[in-house]
Image (cartoon, rainbow, N blue to C red):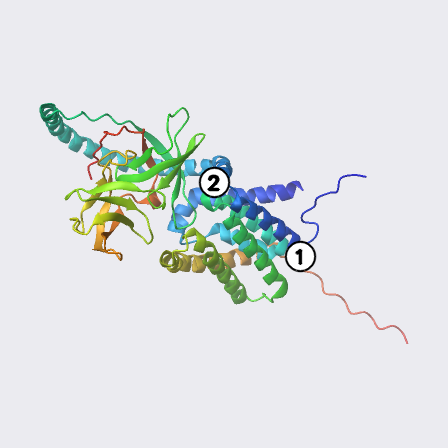
Amino acid sequence: MGFPKIRPFAAGPSAAYVWTVAVAFLLTVSGSRVKSSIASMVIQTAYAPFYSANNKIKRIFTVYQDNQKLLAWVVKLTAENVRLAEAGKENIRLRGKLDFKLRGELTVIPAEVVGSPAVPVRGTIWIAVGPARLLKTGSPVVTPDGLVGNISRLAGDLAIVRSLWDRNCRVAAIDRRSRAAGLVQWVSGPHLAFNYVPLDGDVAVGDTIISSGWGERYPKGLPIGVVQSVAVDSVKFFLWVTVKPFVRFETLEEVFVIQQPGPHDSLEITQ
Amino acid sequence: MISRVVRWGLVVVSVAAYQGLLAEYLSPGGSGLRWDLLIVLLAGLTGGTARGALAGGIVGFVTDCLTPSSLGWGMMVKATLGAAMGMCRERLFLEQVFARWIILAAGVLAHDVVYLLPITDFDLRLYAQTLWLDTGISVIVTSIVGIGVLLVWQAVRKPATPVEPVKPRSTPPA
Protein backbone atom coordinates (compact mmCIF):
# COMPACT_ATOMS: atom_id res chain seq x y z
CA MET A 1 0.00 0.00 0.00
CA GLY A 2 1.61 3.25 -1.13
CA PHE A 3 0.93 6.89 -0.39
CA PRO A 4 -1.90 8.42 -2.39
CA LYS A 5 -0.60 10.65 -5.18
CA ILE A 6 -1.65 14.28 -5.05
CA ARG A 7 -2.31 15.50 -8.59
CA PRO A 8 -4.09 18.85 -8.34
CA PHE A 9 -4.74 19.27 -12.05
CA ALA A 10 -5.78 15.70 -12.79
CA ALA A 11 -9.43 16.28 -11.93
CA GLY A 12 -9.95 18.88 -14.64
CA PRO A 13 -10.03 22.62 -15.10
CA SER A 14 -12.20 23.36 -12.09
CA ALA A 15 -9.71 21.57 -9.80
CA ALA A 16 -6.90 23.74 -11.19
CA TYR A 17 -8.94 26.83 -10.38
CA VAL A 18 -9.87 25.62 -6.90
CA TRP A 19 -6.23 24.81 -6.03
CA THR A 20 -4.98 28.16 -7.30
CA VAL A 21 -7.63 30.09 -5.38
CA ALA A 22 -6.96 28.00 -2.26
CA VAL A 23 -3.26 28.95 -2.38
CA ALA A 24 -4.20 32.60 -3.01
CA PHE A 25 -6.59 32.54 -0.05
CA LEU A 26 -3.89 31.13 2.23
CA LEU A 27 -1.55 33.94 1.14
CA THR A 28 -4.28 36.54 1.70
CA VAL A 29 -4.94 35.46 5.28
CA SER A 30 -1.27 34.95 6.19
CA GLY A 31 0.47 37.47 8.44
CA SER A 32 2.25 40.57 7.21
CA ARG A 33 5.68 39.16 8.13
CA VAL A 34 5.09 36.07 5.99
CA LYS A 35 3.83 38.24 3.13
CA SER A 36 6.82 40.58 3.36
CA SER A 37 9.30 37.67 3.45
CA ILE A 38 7.75 36.02 0.38
CA ALA A 39 7.52 39.34 -1.48
CA SER A 40 11.11 40.33 -0.71
CA MET A 41 12.32 36.93 -1.98
CA VAL A 42 10.47 37.41 -5.29
CA ILE A 43 11.56 41.05 -5.61
CA GLN A 44 15.21 40.10 -5.09
CA THR A 45 15.13 37.23 -7.58
CA ALA A 46 12.70 38.35 -10.28
CA TYR A 47 12.37 42.13 -10.22
CA ALA A 48 15.66 43.55 -8.91
CA PRO A 49 17.73 42.76 -12.07
CA PHE A 50 15.22 44.56 -14.30
CA TYR A 51 14.82 47.59 -12.06
CA SER A 52 18.58 47.83 -11.75
CA ALA A 53 18.99 47.59 -15.56
CA ASN A 54 16.32 50.24 -16.04
CA ASN A 55 18.06 52.62 -13.64
CA LYS A 56 21.42 52.07 -15.37
CA ILE A 57 19.93 52.76 -18.81
CA LYS A 58 18.27 55.92 -17.54
CA ARG A 59 21.49 57.10 -15.93
CA ILE A 60 23.40 56.70 -19.19
CA PHE A 61 20.88 58.86 -21.01
CA THR A 62 20.64 61.54 -18.35
CA VAL A 63 24.26 61.79 -17.21
CA TYR A 64 25.15 64.80 -19.41
CA GLN A 65 22.06 66.79 -18.48
CA ASP A 66 22.55 65.90 -14.82
CA ASN A 67 26.15 67.04 -15.02
CA GLN A 68 25.17 70.43 -16.45
CA LYS A 69 22.48 70.84 -13.85
CA LEU A 70 24.83 69.86 -11.03
CA LEU A 71 27.53 72.27 -12.19
CA ALA A 72 25.00 75.09 -12.04
CA TRP A 73 23.99 73.90 -8.58
CA VAL A 74 27.61 73.79 -7.41
CA VAL A 75 28.15 77.43 -8.38
CA LYS A 76 24.90 78.48 -6.72
CA LEU A 77 25.54 76.43 -3.58
CA THR A 78 29.12 77.63 -3.21
CA ALA A 79 27.87 81.20 -2.95
CA GLU A 80 25.07 80.07 -0.65
CA ASN A 81 27.55 78.14 1.48
CA VAL A 82 29.67 81.20 2.13
CA ARG A 83 26.60 83.11 3.23
CA LEU A 84 25.34 80.25 5.41
CA ALA A 85 28.73 79.69 7.01
CA GLU A 86 28.62 83.27 8.25
CA ALA A 87 25.02 82.83 9.39
CA GLY A 88 25.97 79.55 11.11
CA LYS A 89 28.75 81.20 13.08
CA GLU A 90 26.38 83.94 14.08
CA ASN A 91 23.76 81.34 15.05
CA ILE A 92 26.23 79.44 17.26
CA ARG A 93 27.29 82.66 18.91
CA LEU A 94 23.69 83.71 19.59
CA ARG A 95 22.67 80.24 20.75
CA GLY A 96 25.57 80.28 23.15
CA LYS A 97 24.34 83.57 24.53
CA LEU A 98 20.79 82.20 24.91
CA ASP A 99 22.07 78.88 26.34
CA PHE A 100 20.34 76.75 23.62
CA LYS A 101 21.38 73.14 22.89
CA LEU A 102 23.38 72.62 19.68
CA ARG A 103 21.71 70.54 16.95
CA GLY A 104 23.30 67.29 15.81
CA GLU A 105 24.70 66.32 12.41
CA LEU A 106 22.55 64.10 10.22
CA THR A 107 23.88 61.20 8.18
CA VAL A 108 22.10 60.38 4.93
CA ILE A 109 22.53 57.13 3.00
CA PRO A 110 21.73 57.04 -0.73
CA ALA A 111 19.47 54.22 -1.89
CA GLU A 112 18.10 53.09 -5.22
CA VAL A 113 14.38 52.56 -5.81
CA VAL A 114 14.01 49.01 -7.08
CA GLY A 115 10.27 48.57 -7.07
CA SER A 116 6.93 50.22 -6.73
CA PRO A 117 3.46 48.76 -6.92
CA ALA A 118 1.91 47.86 -10.25
CA VAL A 119 -1.39 49.44 -9.31
CA PRO A 120 -2.08 53.17 -9.34
CA VAL A 121 -2.54 53.40 -5.58
CA ARG A 122 0.93 53.37 -4.13
CA GLY A 123 1.74 53.09 -0.46
CA THR A 124 4.85 50.93 -0.61
CA ILE A 125 8.22 51.46 -2.28
CA TRP A 126 11.14 49.03 -2.37
CA ILE A 127 14.65 50.43 -2.08
CA ALA A 128 18.07 48.80 -2.29
CA VAL A 129 20.18 50.11 0.56
CA GLY A 130 23.19 47.86 0.04
CA PRO A 131 24.84 45.53 2.54
CA ALA A 132 26.30 46.47 5.91
CA ARG A 133 24.08 49.52 6.27
CA LEU A 134 23.12 50.17 9.84
CA LEU A 135 19.53 51.17 9.23
CA LYS A 136 16.61 50.84 11.57
CA THR A 137 12.95 50.50 10.84
CA GLY A 138 11.34 53.91 11.13
CA SER A 139 14.30 55.74 9.56
CA PRO A 140 13.03 58.68 7.48
CA VAL A 141 13.42 58.50 3.68
CA VAL A 142 13.78 61.71 1.70
CA THR A 143 14.69 63.13 -1.70
CA PRO A 144 16.05 66.60 -2.43
CA ASP A 145 12.41 67.58 -3.05
CA GLY A 146 11.15 66.49 0.34
CA LEU A 147 9.90 63.70 2.56
CA VAL A 148 9.05 60.30 1.04
CA GLY A 149 8.15 58.25 4.14
CA ASN A 150 9.91 55.88 6.51
CA ILE A 151 11.33 52.37 6.48
CA SER A 152 8.73 49.88 7.60
CA ARG A 153 10.75 46.70 7.16
CA LEU A 154 14.29 45.59 6.30
CA ALA A 155 14.77 42.48 4.18
CA GLY A 156 18.44 41.79 3.43
CA ASP A 157 19.77 44.43 1.06
CA LEU A 158 16.26 45.72 0.45
CA ALA A 159 14.01 47.88 2.56
CA ILE A 160 10.28 48.49 2.33
CA VAL A 161 9.43 52.18 2.55
CA ARG A 162 6.05 53.16 3.92
CA SER A 163 5.36 56.26 1.85
CA LEU A 164 3.22 59.28 2.69
CA TRP A 165 0.42 57.59 0.70
CA ASP A 166 0.17 54.89 3.35
CA ARG A 167 -2.56 55.49 5.92
CA ASN A 168 -0.20 54.39 8.70
CA CYS A 169 2.40 57.03 7.83
CA ARG A 170 1.77 60.13 9.96
CA VAL A 171 4.11 63.08 10.22
CA ALA A 172 4.04 65.82 12.84
CA ALA A 173 4.24 68.99 10.78
CA ILE A 174 4.06 72.77 10.85
CA ASP A 175 3.25 75.54 8.42
CA ARG A 176 6.60 77.11 7.51
CA ARG A 177 5.14 80.63 7.40
CA SER A 178 2.79 80.74 10.39
CA ARG A 179 4.20 77.76 12.40
CA ALA A 180 0.65 76.36 12.81
CA ALA A 181 1.05 72.73 13.86
CA GLY A 182 -0.80 69.59 12.78
CA LEU A 183 -0.40 66.05 11.56
CA VAL A 184 0.14 65.14 7.89
CA GLN A 185 -1.34 61.84 6.74
CA TRP A 186 -3.12 60.41 3.73
CA VAL A 187 -6.82 59.86 4.34
CA SER A 188 -8.30 59.60 0.86
CA GLY A 189 -8.19 61.26 -2.52
CA PRO A 190 -5.29 62.62 -4.52
CA HIS A 191 -3.83 64.85 -1.77
CA LEU A 192 -2.48 64.47 1.75
CA ALA A 193 -4.35 65.92 4.70
CA PHE A 194 -2.87 68.35 7.25
CA ASN A 195 -5.05 67.35 10.19
CA TYR A 196 -5.70 68.66 13.69
CA VAL A 197 -5.00 72.31 12.89
CA PRO A 198 -7.23 74.39 15.20
CA LEU A 199 -9.94 76.52 13.60
CA ASP A 200 -7.99 79.69 14.40
CA GLY A 201 -4.79 78.24 12.89
CA ASP A 202 -3.22 80.48 10.27
CA VAL A 203 -2.91 78.25 7.18
CA ALA A 204 -3.29 79.64 3.66
CA VAL A 205 -3.26 78.15 0.19
CA GLY A 206 0.31 78.07 -1.15
CA ASP A 207 1.96 77.69 2.29
CA THR A 208 4.75 75.15 2.62
CA ILE A 209 4.27 72.38 5.16
CA ILE A 210 7.43 71.01 6.81
CA SER A 211 8.08 68.35 9.44
CA SER A 212 8.05 69.77 12.97
CA GLY A 213 10.41 67.22 14.52
CA TRP A 214 7.99 66.74 17.43
CA GLY A 215 7.35 63.06 16.80
CA GLU A 216 11.11 62.38 17.12
CA ARG A 217 10.93 60.14 14.05
CA TYR A 218 11.45 62.83 11.40
CA PRO A 219 13.97 65.62 11.81
CA LYS A 220 12.65 69.16 11.83
CA GLY A 221 12.43 71.06 8.56
CA LEU A 222 11.83 68.35 5.95
CA PRO A 223 9.59 69.81 3.24
CA ILE A 224 6.40 67.78 2.83
CA GLY A 225 4.18 69.69 0.44
CA VAL A 226 2.25 72.80 -0.43
CA VAL A 227 -1.24 73.65 0.83
CA GLN A 228 -3.87 73.15 -1.87
CA SER A 229 -7.08 74.02 -0.05
CA VAL A 230 -8.28 75.07 3.40
CA ALA A 231 -11.79 74.40 4.70
CA VAL A 232 -13.56 73.80 8.00
CA ASP A 233 -13.71 70.13 8.99
CA SER A 234 -17.13 68.45 9.16
CA VAL A 235 -16.85 68.06 12.94
CA LYS A 236 -15.93 71.77 13.15
CA PHE A 237 -13.11 71.43 15.65
CA PHE A 238 -10.28 71.63 13.15
CA LEU A 239 -9.42 73.01 9.74
CA TRP A 240 -9.54 70.61 6.78
CA VAL A 241 -6.30 71.28 4.90
CA THR A 242 -5.19 69.36 1.81
CA VAL A 243 -1.52 69.24 0.88
CA LYS A 244 0.09 68.36 -2.44
CA PRO A 245 3.38 66.57 -1.70
CA PHE A 246 6.59 67.92 -3.21
CA VAL A 247 7.87 64.43 -4.02
CA ARG A 248 6.61 62.92 -7.28
CA PHE A 249 6.22 59.31 -6.20
CA GLU A 250 5.62 57.91 -9.67
CA THR A 251 9.08 59.00 -10.91
CA LEU A 252 11.21 58.15 -7.89
CA GLU A 253 14.61 56.72 -8.79
CA GLU A 254 16.93 57.58 -5.93
CA VAL A 255 16.16 58.39 -2.34
CA PHE A 256 18.16 59.09 0.81
CA VAL A 257 17.69 57.38 4.14
CA ILE A 258 18.37 59.53 7.18
CA GLN A 259 20.01 57.57 9.94
CA GLN A 260 17.68 57.62 12.90
CA PRO A 261 18.02 61.14 14.29
CA GLY A 262 18.09 62.17 17.88
CA PRO A 263 15.27 64.20 19.41
CA HIS A 264 16.90 67.57 18.70
CA ASP A 265 18.23 67.00 15.17
CA SER A 266 17.20 69.40 12.45
CA LEU A 267 17.55 69.60 8.69
CA GLU A 268 16.55 72.26 6.20
CA ILE A 269 16.31 71.34 2.54
CA THR A 270 16.08 74.38 0.27
CA GLN A 271 13.26 74.22 -2.27
CA MET B 1 7.24 18.69 -17.98
CA ILE B 2 10.45 20.71 -18.55
CA SER B 3 8.84 22.66 -21.38
CA ARG B 4 5.94 23.55 -19.06
CA VAL B 5 8.32 24.80 -16.37
CA VAL B 6 10.21 26.82 -18.99
CA ARG B 7 6.94 28.23 -20.34
CA TRP B 8 5.70 29.40 -16.93
CA GLY B 9 9.19 30.65 -16.10
CA LEU B 10 9.08 32.79 -19.22
CA VAL B 11 5.71 34.15 -18.11
CA VAL B 12 7.22 35.18 -14.76
CA VAL B 13 10.27 36.73 -16.43
CA SER B 14 8.15 38.62 -18.95
CA VAL B 15 5.94 40.07 -16.20
CA ALA B 16 8.98 41.06 -14.11
CA ALA B 17 10.74 42.51 -17.17
CA TYR B 18 7.69 44.52 -18.15
CA GLN B 19 7.19 45.90 -14.63
CA GLY B 20 10.89 46.61 -14.19
CA LEU B 21 11.76 48.04 -17.59
CA LEU B 22 8.75 49.08 -19.62
CA ALA B 23 5.77 49.74 -17.33
CA GLU B 24 7.17 53.16 -16.44
CA TYR B 25 6.86 54.25 -20.09
CA LEU B 26 3.97 52.14 -21.41
CA SER B 27 1.79 52.19 -18.31
CA PRO B 28 2.62 55.30 -16.26
CA GLY B 29 0.78 55.20 -12.96
CA GLY B 30 -0.97 51.98 -13.93
CA SER B 31 -2.89 53.48 -16.86
CA GLY B 32 -1.83 52.04 -20.19
CA LEU B 33 -0.82 48.60 -21.33
CA ARG B 34 -1.34 46.04 -18.54
CA TRP B 35 0.93 43.24 -19.68
CA ASP B 36 0.18 41.07 -16.64
CA LEU B 37 -3.56 41.18 -17.32
CA LEU B 38 -3.01 40.59 -21.01
CA ILE B 39 -1.12 37.35 -20.32
CA VAL B 40 -3.93 36.09 -18.09
CA LEU B 41 -6.64 37.02 -20.60
CA LEU B 42 -4.81 35.47 -23.54
CA ALA B 43 -3.92 32.33 -21.59
CA GLY B 44 -7.60 31.86 -20.77
CA LEU B 45 -8.81 32.66 -24.27
CA THR B 46 -6.31 30.39 -26.02
CA GLY B 47 -5.63 27.69 -23.44
CA GLY B 48 -8.91 27.16 -21.61
CA THR B 49 -10.02 27.27 -17.99
CA ALA B 50 -7.17 25.36 -16.33
CA ARG B 51 -4.42 27.21 -18.15
CA GLY B 52 -6.18 30.54 -17.59
CA ALA B 53 -6.53 29.90 -13.85
CA LEU B 54 -2.91 28.81 -13.56
CA ALA B 55 -1.65 31.82 -15.54
CA GLY B 56 -3.80 34.08 -13.37
CA GLY B 57 -2.41 32.51 -10.22
CA ILE B 58 1.23 32.82 -11.28
CA VAL B 59 0.97 36.31 -12.75
CA GLY B 60 -1.14 37.49 -9.80
CA PHE B 61 1.42 36.16 -7.33
CA VAL B 62 4.33 37.86 -9.11
CA THR B 63 2.58 41.25 -9.37
CA ASP B 64 1.21 41.03 -5.82
CA CYS B 65 4.77 40.87 -4.51
CA LEU B 66 5.15 44.56 -5.37
CA THR B 67 2.47 45.37 -2.78
CA PRO B 68 3.03 42.78 -0.02
CA SER B 69 0.03 43.94 2.00
CA SER B 70 -2.32 42.70 -0.74
CA LEU B 71 -0.40 39.48 -1.47
CA GLY B 72 -2.88 36.78 -2.49
CA TRP B 73 -5.77 39.06 -3.39
CA GLY B 74 -4.52 39.88 -6.88
CA MET B 75 -3.68 36.20 -7.36
CA MET B 76 -7.24 35.23 -6.47
CA VAL B 77 -8.81 37.83 -8.76
CA LYS B 78 -6.53 37.06 -11.69
CA ALA B 79 -7.01 33.29 -11.33
CA THR B 80 -10.77 33.84 -11.42
CA LEU B 81 -10.38 36.10 -14.44
CA GLY B 82 -8.23 33.55 -16.26
CA ALA B 83 -10.72 30.77 -15.52
CA ALA B 84 -13.61 32.98 -16.65
CA MET B 85 -11.80 33.72 -19.92
CA GLY B 86 -11.31 29.98 -20.41
CA MET B 87 -15.01 29.41 -19.85
CA CYS B 88 -15.81 32.15 -22.38
CA ARG B 89 -13.62 30.38 -24.89
CA GLU B 90 -15.34 27.05 -24.25
CA ARG B 91 -18.92 28.30 -24.13
CA LEU B 92 -19.11 31.35 -26.38
CA PHE B 93 -18.65 31.69 -30.12
CA LEU B 94 -15.66 34.04 -30.35
CA GLU B 95 -14.59 33.84 -33.96
CA GLN B 96 -15.19 37.50 -34.78
CA VAL B 97 -12.46 39.99 -33.87
CA PHE B 98 -15.01 42.39 -32.39
CA ALA B 99 -16.38 39.71 -30.05
CA ARG B 100 -12.88 38.98 -28.79
CA TRP B 101 -12.14 42.66 -28.33
CA ILE B 102 -15.28 43.03 -26.23
CA ILE B 103 -14.30 40.05 -24.09
CA LEU B 104 -10.76 41.37 -23.56
CA ALA B 105 -12.01 44.86 -22.67
CA ALA B 106 -14.62 43.40 -20.30
CA GLY B 107 -11.92 41.27 -18.70
CA VAL B 108 -9.67 44.25 -17.90
CA LEU B 109 -12.62 46.26 -16.60
CA ALA B 110 -13.96 43.39 -14.47
CA HIS B 111 -10.49 42.84 -12.98
CA ASP B 112 -10.07 46.45 -11.88
CA VAL B 113 -13.66 46.75 -10.63
CA VAL B 114 -13.08 43.84 -8.24
CA TYR B 115 -9.38 44.23 -7.52
CA LEU B 116 -9.24 47.94 -6.68
CA LEU B 117 -12.05 47.95 -4.12
CA PRO B 118 -10.02 46.59 -1.15
CA ILE B 119 -6.81 48.12 -2.52
CA THR B 120 -8.37 51.59 -2.13
CA ASP B 121 -9.55 50.65 1.38
CA PHE B 122 -13.17 50.82 0.19
CA ASP B 123 -12.78 54.57 -0.23
CA LEU B 124 -15.41 55.02 -2.92
CA ARG B 125 -14.15 58.43 -4.01
CA LEU B 126 -10.63 57.22 -4.64
CA TYR B 127 -11.99 53.98 -6.11
CA ALA B 128 -14.17 55.82 -8.62
CA GLN B 129 -11.37 58.22 -9.45
CA THR B 130 -8.87 55.41 -10.08
CA LEU B 131 -11.38 53.50 -12.17
CA TRP B 132 -12.27 56.55 -14.22
CA LEU B 133 -8.76 57.85 -14.84
CA ASP B 134 -6.55 54.76 -14.98
CA THR B 135 -8.75 51.80 -15.81
CA GLY B 136 -10.46 53.53 -18.74
CA ILE B 137 -7.19 53.98 -20.61
CA SER B 138 -5.99 50.50 -19.61
CA VAL B 139 -9.16 48.90 -20.97
CA ILE B 140 -8.75 50.49 -24.38
CA VAL B 141 -4.98 50.04 -24.76
CA THR B 142 -4.80 46.51 -23.34
CA SER B 143 -7.72 45.19 -25.37
CA ILE B 144 -6.39 46.64 -28.64
CA VAL B 145 -2.90 45.25 -28.03
CA GLY B 146 -4.53 41.95 -27.02
CA ILE B 147 -6.41 41.70 -30.30
CA GLY B 148 -3.17 42.41 -32.17
CA VAL B 149 -1.33 39.69 -30.26
CA LEU B 150 -4.19 37.23 -30.84
CA LEU B 151 -4.20 37.88 -34.61
CA VAL B 152 -0.41 37.48 -34.84
CA TRP B 153 -0.58 34.32 -32.76
CA GLN B 154 -3.26 32.86 -35.01
CA ALA B 155 -1.29 33.73 -38.14
CA VAL B 156 1.85 32.10 -36.73
CA ARG B 157 0.00 28.96 -35.68
CA LYS B 158 -1.63 28.41 -39.09
CA PRO B 159 -0.23 25.30 -40.85
CA ALA B 160 2.41 26.18 -43.46
CA THR B 161 1.04 23.84 -46.11
CA PRO B 162 -2.65 23.99 -46.94
CA VAL B 163 -4.61 20.90 -46.09
CA GLU B 164 -5.65 19.03 -49.19
CA PRO B 165 -9.40 18.75 -49.67
CA VAL B 166 -10.83 15.29 -49.17
CA LYS B 167 -11.65 13.67 -52.48
CA PRO B 168 -15.26 12.49 -52.82
CA ARG B 169 -15.58 8.77 -52.68
CA SER B 170 -16.38 7.11 -55.96
CA THR B 171 -19.80 5.57 -55.92
CA PRO B 172 -19.64 1.80 -55.50
CA PRO B 173 -20.65 -0.24 -58.50
CA ALA B 174 -24.24 -1.25 -58.44
Name the one closer to the observer, B123 or A258: B123
Relative to A95, does residue B69 appear above or below in the rendering?
A: below
Assess whether mark 2 and mark 1 are in contact (beta carbons under 8 angstroms).
Answer: no
Q: Quadrant of residue A67?
A: top left
For the point 47% across and 60% down, the residue is B109
Q: Amino acid at mark 1?
A: Thr
Q: Secondary structure at mark 1?
A: loop
Q: Which mark is in front, 1 or 2?
A: 2
Name the one closer to the observer, A248 or A181: A181
Q: Secondary structure at mark 2?
A: helix
Q: Residues within 10 Å of mark 2 (few under 14, many from 20)?
A: some
For the point 29% across and 43% down, the residue is A247
Q: Amino acid at mark 2?
A: Ser
Which labelled disc corresponds to residue B161? 1
The chain ID associated with circle 2 is A
Q: Residue B24 appears at what percent x and percent y?
A: 39, 46
Give the residue at mark 2.
Answer: A32
Indicate the quadrant containing the N terminus of chain B: top left, top right, bottom left or bottom right: top right
Q: Residue A207 appears at what percent x and percent y?
A: 18, 47
